[in-house]
Amino acid sequence: MTDIGSRPGTRQPRSGHGEGGASSSEVRRRIRREHIKPRHVSPVLSVIIPTRNEAGNIAQLLRRIEPVAAGHPQLQPFEVIFVDDSTDDTPEVIQLARDAYRWPIRLIHRSPEHRVGGLGGAVLEGMRAAEGTWMVVMDGDLQHPPELIPDLLRQAEQGPCDLVVASRYCADGSASSFNRIRSFVSQGSTLAAKTLFPIRLRHVNDPMSGFFLVRRGALNLETLRPNGFKILLEIVARTPGLRIGSVPFSFGERYAGRSKASLREGFRYLQLLCMLRLGPSITRFGQFGLVGVSGLVVNSLLLALFTETFGIYYLISLLLATQGSSLWNFYLSEYWVFRRSELTRTRLYRGAFFLLMNNVALLARAPIVYVLTSMLGVNYLISNVISMVVLLVLRFAIADSVIWRSPSTQPAVPQAPLPGIAQDQEVAA
């Protein structure tokens, strides 16, 4: 190995002094200082921002983050991590912005095949890459004000807290930017979560918030299995013993782009609730029940239409309504409840068997409806609901084990436990 201070072909000084009269030991020390890399200092704070087609928001977001980072020494060192699932030029915009700021801006762009878990999966990816003692999760559309970050950290340190939630529903918080429908959905979703997890969420008044700070050392990332938007609910439900606080904030207006909220994300949220509360073995039953409720509405509307509008005898109307609601239920079951990569039956077979099952079930339901309606005087619509609820469990058992049977559900080979809460740890309510 060649010595740094004596390169081949270089004449060495005869005396104990090198260039400029400096001693050789001083020269060697200076060379070592110039070649030693500065020790890496882990950041205090990692800001994790999941993005999907947010090119129009990046510049403004970083402009608002900059004074927050510069004006609060307690946040230094500081890093921003974008986890991007975009199909537009958002990654290029982030790359170009890097040179304009003194603090690190990191980009993780997930290819389509790696976009597992939706927005929650992106957040988890960012948490795995984060180096900060504290992690802030926030949206990239400026509905979450970055100016609140110092307040979140201050509350965490004064609490002390492991998790601090930016809440729209505590004192001085606001969600005034929501329209009536979105407000109703948000508050209904919050009520559903708190009803299912009254113990875990007793200190969380906004479990639907996507803006929060958490201590990295308080989480076991391997236990998190996010699905969709609501990563906070996932964290709280799967992490016992968290010390939790809240800071009020006003939910802002989107700066640019379009909202990612959708009916599909609503279904993902319902699936997450079922998974967290009941475990994977019962999740499909919960989903099947929800599909059944929607099918019940369709069935009742068709039954009333055929009976009241067209004057058809109610038992014949029941037969016709069953065909319509069966097609509705099959579509939702096919694309939501039993969506799997491998199935032992073709779609045509599954559709035909599903219709057959519901019509055979109708043979059992019809006497129930007849007895309740014609003999006991119960309204035929109510009788229909009762008959469908009675047979729900049997229909699910046939659908799960026969119609949508996958190779993994065949009983010949013992299966490893599914990686869900009901099988490895119970979530305290």
Image: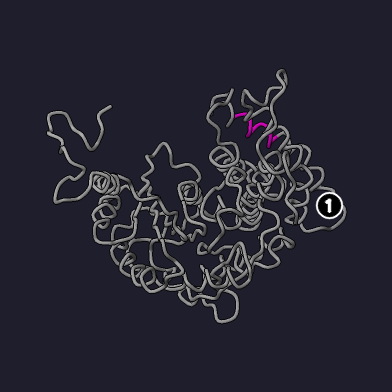
The residue most toward the right is: 376
Position of 25 relative to 201 (above/below):
above
Which quadrant: the C terminus? bottom right
Determine the residue positioned at 56% across, 66% down: 186
Q: Give the labeled residue for mark 1.
A: 372
Could you tell me which secondary element the residue under label 1 belongs to? helix
| Left or right of 350 in this view: 105 | left
| Left or right of 16 in this view: 86 | right
Q: Residue 8's x, y, as percent?
A: 16, 28
Q: Residue 80's x, y, as percent?
A: 39, 57
Which quadrant: the N terminus? top left
| Left or right of 404 in this view: 13 | left
Q: Label 1: few (<14), some or many (≥20) within 10 Å?
A: some
Task: Name the residue nearer the viewer: 424 or 219.
Answer: 219
Q: Residue 282's x, y, as percent?
A: 71, 42
* Magenta span of residues: 352-359
Amino acid type shown at disc 1: Leu
- Residue 357 part of the magenta-drawn span: yes
Q: Residue 58's x, y, as percent?
A: 31, 61
Task: Name the residue nearer the viewer: 277 or 70.
Answer: 70
